[in-house]
């Protein structure tokens, strides 16, 4: 009996020792019997580009830029992402907080110009643009500004003539041939349509009322077909103009945003 008890005791101590060794090989806390520990992989603490806050200049790429003249190379980011590339500072990195405000603003303006130059140089694969590009002389920029000025002047004129435009819709067109009457009606209706789109606050008619004015007094089928056909072209032209206006505004906003981020 004594030998049997000793054997059982040794067996118990062996099992306990085995369990301790198993626990020692496992960094997890004690688990219930029969349950295995599963180690959870530790996520890397390295910051990913996607985790960086938006709306700030891309400091990560700044640190990785080669030590070269910025006018002699185009960063890969601009070739990959084009206009969607976040600004990569160069001149601002060479300044310190001790510099005067006008010095910092000048450096920021140089980075604004360099950023726009890199976008254009990458798009056209012309590295010479890095040195000579000036966005204030860019034909695309100048075209946007010209269209913007034209729209502003057109809206001002429509606002000024709103009452006259609406009154002329109801005027009787006497002493005119049917063809002349149709052309006068369409010309006046086009002005009213532009007023409806660009100056809705000055418009007393809704779209249905505007269409009724177009068809008022048109009885012959041929005349009706001609009126609707030309009105359709006017609407298409106006849609194209407003689409271009949205694109111009988007491009101007993107350029202003880049400048704001740098400054």
Image: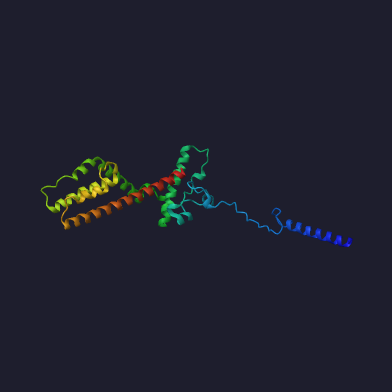
- For the point 29% across and 41% down, the residue is 201
Q: Position of residue 98 (x, y in %)?
A: 53, 38
Viewer-closest of 234 and 82:
234
Q: Quadrant of residue 171?
A: top left
Applied colour scheme:
rainbow
In this view, 35 is above or below 112 = below
In this view, 42 is above or below 110 = below
Q: Position of residue 178 (x, y in %)?
A: 13, 53
Name of the residue lying farthest toward the right: 2
- For the point 86% across and 60% down, the residue is 5
Name of the residue lying farthest toward the left: 175
- For the point 14% across and 54% down, the residue is 179
**Can residue 8 be seen by looking at this rendering?**
yes
In this view, 106 is above or below 131 = above
Q: Position of residue 155 (x, y in %)?
A: 28, 43
249 sits left or right of 162 in the view? right
Viewer-closest of 188 and 1:
1
**Can residue 65 be seen by looking at this rendering?**
no
Q: Quadrant of residue 205?
A: top left
Q: How many marks?
A: 0
> Quarter of the image containing the N terminus?
bottom right
3 sits left or right of 210 in the view? right
Viewer-closest of 260 and 112:
260
Name of the residue lying farthest toward the front: 1
Viewer-closest of 90 and 171:
171
66 sits left or right of 250 in the view? right
Q: Position of residue 217 (x, y in %)?
A: 16, 50
- For the point 74% across and 58% down, the residue is 22
């Amino acid at each position: 009996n004594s030998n049997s008890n000793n054997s059982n005791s040794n067996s118990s101590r062996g099992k306990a020792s085995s369990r301790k060794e198993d626990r020692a090989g496992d960094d997890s806390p004690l688990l219930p019997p029969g349950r295995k520990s599963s180690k959870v992989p530790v996520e890397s603490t390295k910051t990913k580009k996607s985790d960086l806050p938006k709306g700030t200049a891309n400091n990560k790429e700044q640190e990785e830029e080669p030590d070269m003249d910025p006018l002699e190379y185009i960063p890969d980011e601009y070739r990959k992402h084009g206009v969607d590339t976040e600004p990569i500072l160069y001149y601002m990195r060479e300044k310190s907080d001790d510099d005067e405000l006008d010095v910092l603003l000048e450096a920021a303006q140089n980075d604004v110009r360099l950023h726009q130059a890199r976008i254009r140089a990458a798009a056209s694969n012309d590295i010479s643009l890095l040195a000579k590009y000036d966005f204030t002389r860019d034909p695309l920029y100048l075209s946007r500004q010209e269209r913007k000025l034209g729209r502003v002047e057109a809206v001002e004129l429509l606002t000024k003539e709103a009452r006259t435009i609406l009154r002329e819709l109801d005027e009787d067109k006497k002493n005119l041939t049917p063809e002349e009457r149709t052309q006068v009606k369409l010309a006046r209706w086009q002005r009213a349509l532009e007023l409806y789109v660009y100056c809705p606050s000055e418009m007393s008619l809704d779209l249905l009322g505007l269409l009724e004015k177009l068809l008022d007094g048109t009885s012959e089928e041929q005349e009706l077909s001609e009126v609707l056909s030309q009105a359709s072209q006017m609407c298409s032209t106006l849609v194209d103009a407003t689409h271009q206006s949205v694109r111009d505004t988007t491009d101007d906003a993107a350029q202003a945003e880049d400048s704001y981020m740098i400054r």
